[in-house]
């Protein structure tokens, strides 16, 4: 069923996890001529004092701060950053924040490493121009949200504002060199961000189970990520500064990243993209709200792996997992979030025909067409 299929695994990221590990940042910079660092982060990190602390931790190096990263980075802004930074001769990159900061850092480590002004990111993502085989700059990833798992993957999500399409920059060299998982950095994360990014963790885990590319290793990591999210996410809504639960979610997020680095995502993500680009629904919510309906839908085609993953996640079986998901959604307030972001059935149904990204929706173990997608939306959203 799973073990008799071909599967492979590659993940070169050195992971260091634990409260306070950010203080070891400088020790993860390789020896040699590594004096100029690009620090990519969000305005929020600077406002919370994280940027200042990291500059101190990087010692006497020259630190160039790019803290204008906004949610859902697009091709034009990344090309602009590249133009600004091209003459700086950056030696390495540190990305700090959520998925948008880490993905921007990855893209820039790649583009600045190429040292080729003729190479066009837009042409690569939207056309057939190959990415030259030149290693990106050395990169350290410091996630401060638990959701994207970007620190564990060779992908960077980049949007095209002109076409409202989502692209992935993909290369085996895009795995960060080091990931520092320091839960202390996520202690002050607002509850809403915690919940929305936590839904992304669950989405990555579940999407890698009902996935044609699943294998024994991805199922094991997914089951642990599901177990962690079901336990830690509601606890963090009650007590956001619980360090152990924060550390659990960072671990779960890394596991989810490992999962999708093996399988890539599936239908929930494919359905989410127009909801984010056209309606502004945050990524984790956009791909998370369909999970209970997708579990029921994919359970029909289960070859045993969903049942196995649900058991390994401590839910007994598929029906137990379904109940736990329902309970979780109630506890973490998914319905309120859908209302807040004005995501109703009518608005989502109007975008249904744009919800098919073949390299994502095609991964689903149970094939879905427009009729099925419309049914999943109706089962997931109040009318
Ligand atoms: Fe995601």
Image (tube, rainbow, N blue to C red):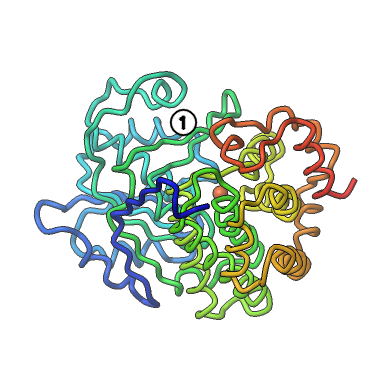
Secondary structure under badge 1? helix
372 vs 146, nearest the viewer: 372
The x, y position of residue 264, in whole percent, is 49, 44
Q: Is residue 252 left or right of residue 334?
A: left
Could you tell me which residue is drawn at 59 percent across and 24 percent down? 163
Could you tell me which residue is drawn at 47 percent across and 62 percent down? 221
Q: Is residue 95 above or below residue 309?
A: above
> Which residue is at the far left?
32
The x, y position of residue 96, in whole percent, is 40, 57
Question: Any atom of ligand 1 within 8 Å of the CB at mark 1?
Answer: no
Q: Is residue 131 above or below residue 381?
A: above
322 vs 103, nearest the viewer: 322
The x, y position of residue 378, in whole percent, is 84, 44
Q: Is residue 241 left or right of residue 315?
A: left
The x, y position of residue 314, in whole percent, is 61, 74
Q: Is residue 35 left or right of residue 173?
A: left
Could you tell me which residue is drawn at 42 percent across and 43 percent down? 155
Could you tell me which residue is drawn at 24 percent across and 49 percent down? 138
In which image quadrant can residue 97 be found?
bottom left
Residue at which label 1 appears: 75
Q: Is residue 213 above or below residue 333?
A: above
Q: Quadrant of the C terminus?
A: top right
Q: Residues within 10 Å of mark 1 (few under 14, many from 20)?
A: many
| Number of marks in picture | 1
């Amino acid at each position: 069923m799973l073990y008799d299929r071909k599967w492979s695994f590659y993940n070169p990221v050195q992971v260091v996890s634990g409260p306070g590990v950010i203080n070891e940042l400088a020790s993860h910079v390789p020896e040699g001529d590594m004096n100029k660092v690009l620090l990519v982060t969000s305005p929020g990190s600077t406002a919370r004092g994280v940027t200042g602390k990291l500059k101190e931790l990087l010692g006497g190096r020259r630190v160039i701060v790019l803290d204008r990263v906004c949610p859902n980075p697009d091709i034009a802004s990344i090309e602009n950053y590249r133009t600004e930074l091209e003459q700086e001769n950056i030696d390495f990159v540190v990305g700090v924040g959520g998925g948008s900061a880490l993905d921007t850092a990855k893209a820039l480590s790649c583009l600045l490493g190429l040292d080729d002004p003729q190479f066009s990111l837009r042409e690569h993502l939207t056309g057939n121009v190959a990415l030259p085989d030149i290693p990106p700059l050395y990169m350290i990833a410091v996630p401060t949200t638990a959701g994207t798992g970007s620190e564990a993957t060779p992908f960077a999500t980049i949007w095209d504002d002109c076409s409202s399409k989502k692209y992935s920059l993909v290369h085996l060299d895009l795995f960060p060199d080091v990931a520092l998982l320091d839960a202390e950095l996520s202690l002050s994360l607002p509850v809403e961000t915690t919940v929305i990014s936590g839904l992304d963790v669950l989405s990555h885990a579940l999407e890698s189970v009902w996935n044609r590319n699943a294998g024994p290793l991805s199922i094991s990591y997914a089951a642990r990520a599901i177990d962690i999210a079901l336990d830690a996410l509601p606890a963090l809504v009650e007590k956001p500064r619980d360090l152990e639960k924060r550390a659990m979610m960072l671990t779960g997020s890394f596991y989810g990243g490992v999962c999708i680095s093996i399988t890539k995502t599936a239908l929930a993500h494919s359905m989410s993209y127009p909801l984010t680009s056209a309606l502004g629904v945050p990524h984790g919510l956009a791909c998370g709200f369909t999970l209970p309906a997708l579990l029921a839908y994919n359970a029909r085609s289960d070859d045993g792996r969903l049942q196995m993953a649900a058991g390994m996640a401590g839910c007994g079986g598929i029906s137990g997992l379904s109940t736990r998901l329902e309970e979780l959604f109630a506890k973490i307030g998914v319905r309120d979030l859908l209302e807040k972001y004005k995501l109703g059935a009518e608005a989502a149904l109007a975008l249904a025909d744009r919800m098919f990204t073949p390299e994502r929706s095609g991964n689903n173990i149970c094939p879905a067409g427009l009729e099925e997608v419309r049914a999943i939306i109706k089962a997931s959203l109040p009318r």
